[in-house]
Image (cartoon, helix red, strand yellow):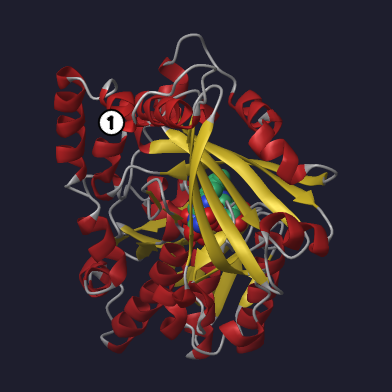
């Protein structure tokens, strides 16, 4: 039987963030990761917002294996036969320090794990936690591969379906309406092809989101990020929508259809798919967060539900890094007070409340409800793209004036519904 100061379950960004921060303070930390190496089981779309977490890990970013800084943003409304895109570039996106980067987790997590090990954390891969040790009403350690491993505190960072938090009674099994599923391919292309196709200079990168027909009008969307020598392309669909939709749709089929769209086919042409992955994402927002602490245990990252999709941004990685950091800070404070019970670890929730993490979740607490409106994913993409079709159409005879062309889409009934939809959008 071995005893550590802290056992971290899961070597993703939350787990490695906690381990790195604790090891920096010379605590004995053990990270148990079931994958072959950190990053091997971790799926993300591909863009990390560094600005909110830069100061939490000041010595990390200069050498981090990030792909491209995002200098060009885009969003496309896709209807069945046409699409409308808005692209955004700005001087502020070019300025150092850059806001966000494309990232490949297989590279980044592996590197981050090495930094945590250098600080003194102990990482054991191919090691699945099978159970927690409960003793006198508190979590006292874990069972992994038949080994009994004890610690003052266990930090559950085992991702979206966190079995550790569930075993400790801090969350129930996930509900379909609070989760989405994502499918992603990494498609290799030479750097100069990517730079030409996306009009990128040097290490500039592009991020593009898609909504509408890409999910056949279901809650969710598509994403495309440029890496150094590959593209990350994928879709995310709400699980409840997927289960209830009729006719039934196989989500992987949506990704295949997405790739065949002419708008996408031209961008990935000649590329080779070198990675395919699928993963669940917590998207239930504030109301779906787990309890964050208990006797001898803290929950961070996706395990706690810290991931958010508000259409134009999908965020989870910086919440994982930040919650891992604050979990570590909570352990350090609990250690000073020699109290690893729920009362000693409760400071974790306060630290999160004072940070951007809980402030974001408060600010966007209505987002899941507002965005589940199917009109955003079906009606508006059709409406907007049809308007564009009529605007640009050149008939063989005389062309109608612009105002009546547009006005025919703005009947009273439509305007009333639009007003209702956008009144709700004010909440986010
Ligand atoms: C398709 C998709 C697109 C996304 N796009 C973005 C994006 O562009 N930007 C963004 O910021 N976020 C995005 N997210 C969300 C983001 O990827 C997650 O929020 C983030 O990866 C969570 O990190 P984590 O460390 O909490 O969990 P994870 O990265 O899932 O790590 C959990 C770790 O725990 C390990 N583990 C699980 N169970 C056990 C066990 N019993 N024993 C030992 N180890 C265990 C796993 O192997 C894994 O390594 C996306 C997610 C998906 C799926």
Counting from the top left corner in percent of width and height, residue 183 is at 61, 38
Say what secondary structure mark 1 lies in. Answer: helix
The furthest residue to the top: 247
Q: Is residue 51 left or right of residue 376?
A: right
Q: Is residue 423 left or right of residue 24?
A: left
Residue 36 visible, this angle? no
Counting from the top left corner in percent of width and height, residue 8 is at 51, 66
Position above or below: 119 against 135: below
Choose between 164 and 246: the one closer to the eye.
Answer: 246
Choose between 164 and 401: the one closer to the eye.
Answer: 401
Position above or below: 139 against 24: above
Position above or below: 409 against 148: above
Residue 202 visible, this angle? yes
Ligand 1, image quadrant it occupies: bottom right
Counting from the top left corner in percent of width and height, residue 331 is at 36, 78
Choose between 135 and 6: the one closer to the eye.
Answer: 6
The furthest residue to the front: 398
Residue at image position (61%, 41%) is 234
Query: Which corner quadrant holds the N terminus?
Result: bottom right
Residue at image position (34%, 39%) is 172
Residue at label 1? 403
Residue at image position (38%, 72%) is 327
Counting from the top left corner in percent of width and height, residue 385 is at 45, 30
Residue at image position (25%, 53%) is 364
User: Badge 1, how many Cα within 10 Å: few under 14, some, many 20+?
Assistant: few
Q: Is the distance from the Cβ of mark 1 to the nearest ligand 1 atom less than 8 Å?
A: no
Q: Is residue 73 left or right of residue 283?
A: right
Q: Is residue 341 left or right of residue 304?
A: left
């Amino acid at each position: 039987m071995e005893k550590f100061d802290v056992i971290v379950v899961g070597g993703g960004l939350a787990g490695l963030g906690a381990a790195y921060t604790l090891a920096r303070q010379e605590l004995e930390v053990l990270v148990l990761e079931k994958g072959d190496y950190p990053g091997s089981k971790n799926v993300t779309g591909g863009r990390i917002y560094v600005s909110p977490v830069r100061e939490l890990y000041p010595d990390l970013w200069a050498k981090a294996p990030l792909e491209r800084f995002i200098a060009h943003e885009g969003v496309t409304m896709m209807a069945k036969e046409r699409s409308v895109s808005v692209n955004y570039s700005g001087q502020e996106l070019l300025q150092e320090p850059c806001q966000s980067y494309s990232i490949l987790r297989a590279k980044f997590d592996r590197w981050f794990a090495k930094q945590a090990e250098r600080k003194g954390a102990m990482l054991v891969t191919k090691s699945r936690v099978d159970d927690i040790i409960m003793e006198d009403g508190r979590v006292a350690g874990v069972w992994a591969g038949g080994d009994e491993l004890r610690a003052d505190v266990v930090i559950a960072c085992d991702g979206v379906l966190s079995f550790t938090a569930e075993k400790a009674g801090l969350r129930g099994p996930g509900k379909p309406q609070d989760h989405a599923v994502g499918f992603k391919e990494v498609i290799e292309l030479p750097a100069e092809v990517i730079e030409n196709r996306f009009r990128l200079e040097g290490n500039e990168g592009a991020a593009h989101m898609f909504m509408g027909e890409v999910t056949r009008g279901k809650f969710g969307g598509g994403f495309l990020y440029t890496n150094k020598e590959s593209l990350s392309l994928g879709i995310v669909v709400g699980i409840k929508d997927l289960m209830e939709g009729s006719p039934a749709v196989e989500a992987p089929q949506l990704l295949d259809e997405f790739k065949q769209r002419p708008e996408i086919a031209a961008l990935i042409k000649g590329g080779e798919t070198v990675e395919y992955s699928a993963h669940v994402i917590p998207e239930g927002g504030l109301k779906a967060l787990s309890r964050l602490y208990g006797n001898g245990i803290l929950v961070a990252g996706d395990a706690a539900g810290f991931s958010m999709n508000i259409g134009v941004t999908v965020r989870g990685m910086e919440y994982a890094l930040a919650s891992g950091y604050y979990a570590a800070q909570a352990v350090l404070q609990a250690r000073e007070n020699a109290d690893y019970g729920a009362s000693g670890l409760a400071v974790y929730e306060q630290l999160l409340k004072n940070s951007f993490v809980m402030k974001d979740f408060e600010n966007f607490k209505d987002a899941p409800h507002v965005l589940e409106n199917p009109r955003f994913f079906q009606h508006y993409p059709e409406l907007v793209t049809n308007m564009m079709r009529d605007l640009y159409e050149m008939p063989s005879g005389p062309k109608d004036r612009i105002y009546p062309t547009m006005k025919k889409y703005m009947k009273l009934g439509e305007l009333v519904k639009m007003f209702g939809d956008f009144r709700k959008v004010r909440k986010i």
